[in-house]
Image (cartoon, rainbow, N blue to C red):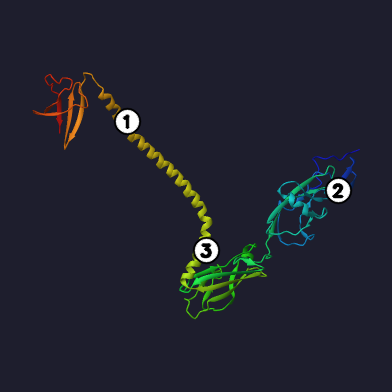
Amino acid sequence: MYAVVTKSPLDREKQPFYDITIVAKDAGNPPLSSEKTFTIAVSDVNDNNPEFSRTHYTFYLNENNAPGASLFSVTATDRDDGENARLSYHIIRDDGSDGKITPFLNINPENGDILALKSFDFEKLKTFKFHVLASDGGTPPLSSNVTVNVFILDQNDNAPVILYPVSSNGSAEGVEETARNMKAGHLVTKVRAYDADVGYNGWLLFSFEGVMDHSLFVLDRYTGQIRTLRSFTETDEAQHKLAILVKDNGNVSLSATATVVVKLVEPKEAISASDVKSVLKADDESNVTFYLMITLGSVSALFIASIIVLVVMQCSKPRELAAAKYLQETNYDGTLCHSIQYRSGEKRYMLVGPRMSIGSTIVPGSHGNTLVVPDRGRTSEEVRPQSLVLIH
């Protein structure tokens, strides 16, 4: 009895079958033998995860898609066999930022076809992503997931919206006044419009749809500026009606129309009209300036008041000190010398002497630079001279 054993682990995914031939030979002379060939099939175990055809998927989807229609599909394979290789697909639904989109997506669990239950709008949603899970039928099942990125492509589904002139009842009409003395190239007004689409679908072009005098006005094709081609004359009409067409560059172009009425006025009237417009425009801007000026004025007034008070206080101090000194010296009866200053012409006299009062009378003498002052306390005695120093 003989047995066939393995020398290394078997891998069905690498080699599912083995053809083996066994030879039995005796030891006679000559030896006799016989052989038997049989096939060994390696049974499968669930040891391989599903594998998607790409590491991640990127799809581009036109907006305004039909709800319920198939958009795209994902595919995965499993190298196992039988139930271990039977795959089913599921969309991973979570509460993240893409959780608002996944409820509107569905997937065929057998083939991975993905369909949308709603129509997408590029102006509201430009991109989103979600995850798809592929699981096999083994026990226990193995699975893997892949990220799907979806970019919504813009379609020309928005007509231009005219911002100026202001739209009213489906039409846009504005009135502009300009002086008759304006020269060629004068900017009359500018038509402003907006398109919610992007790229060529949102690229706007301006043109005249109707104009009374083609030689008088020109419209910039890309900016919407209306300028004068020549100076106005006395024969020109006082009012000109300009019909403006605004259209985009989509494959199926969408458009909107506007009307601008240009009134020719005398220079003074034009200036008055422009002043009224500038005043109305400046009202809002002047509010902030007004409050700012009030604040700065208050701070400046407080600062000036503080300076004035400080100056008055500084000026009043010497006078108070002089008055206090004067009161003190009028009653002084000591023996220390003190001085009194007198000013005569360009010379200044300072009288120095003991027991001298402010009310002393200076009597001129002929003692050189010294004047004699009589002492009132000694009227009958000899006059005691006081020293008066002459200071030039």
Answer above or below: position of 183 versus 73: below
Disc 3 to disc 2: CB gap under 8 Å: no
Residue 21 in the image, given as x and y percentages of width and height: 86, 47
**Quadrant occupied by the N terminus:** top right
155 vs 308, left or right, is right
* Disc 2 to disc 1: CB gap under 8 Å: no
Q: Residues within 10 Å of mark 2 (few under 14, many from 20)?
A: some
Q: Amino acid at mark 2?
A: Glu
The answer to which of 253 and 303 lies nearer the viewer is 303
* Left or right of 173 on screen, residue 217: left
Residue 118, quarter of picture = bottom right
Q: Say which element carries label 2.
A: helix
Would you place residue 316 above or below residue 118 in this image?
A: above
Disc 1 element: helix
Instruction: Identify the disc placed on residue 320.
Output: 1
Q: CA distance from mark 1 to mark 3?
A: 63 Å
Q: In the orientation shown, which residue stands out farthest toward the bottom? A: 235
**Residue at the location (79% across, 46% down)?**
143
Label 3: which residue? Answer: 277
Q: Residue at x 50, y 66 (%)?
A: 274
Residue 306 image label: none
Give how far apart the Cα atoms at labels 3 and 2 are. Answer: 81 Å
Horizontal relation, residue 141 to residue 346: left or right = right
Determine which residue is flagged by label 2: 83
Camera-side residue: 65 or 86?
65
> Which residue type carries mark 3?
Lys
| Residue occupying image coordinates x 20% and y 30% | 341
In the depicted view, which residue is nearer to us: 128 or 172? 172
Which of the two marks, 2 or 1, is nearer to us in this view?
A: 1
Q: Amino acid at mark 1?
A: Glu
